Image (cartoon, rainbow, N blue to C red):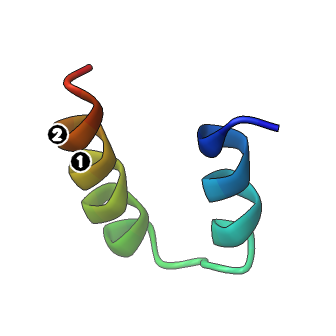
Amino acid sequence: MNYKELIIELLKPVKDTRILKLIYEFVKGITGM
């Protein structure tokens, strides 16, 4: 399991799309994708 899959598993309970988008942008910034 790579870190992206791990993050997805951790975020499955999160229903607030604003939070998901913030985390997505944060991870995208870290990974440079």
Q: Which mark is residue 16?
A: none
Which one is in front, 2 or 8? Answer: 2
| 1 displayed left or right of 30 | right
Residue found at x 77% / y 60%: 9
Q: Going 34% across and 61% down the picture, which residue do you hit?
A: 23
Please, which residue is most extreme toward the front here?
2
| Quarter-of-image position of residue 21 | bottom left
Query: Mark 1 Cα within 10 Å, few/some/many (few <14, many 20+)?
Result: few
Q: Residues within 10 Å of mark 2 (few under 14, many from 20)?
A: few
Circle 2: residue type: Gly
| Viewer-nearest of discs 2 and 1 | 2
- Rendered location of residue 4, percent (x, y): 60, 40
Can you name the residue that lies furthest to the right here?
1
Q: Residue at x 32, y 70 (%)?
A: 18
Residue that carries the numbered disc 1 in the rendered image: 25
Look at the picture and state if 22 lies above or below 33. below
Give the number of the disc on residue 29: 2
The N terminus, quarter of image: top right
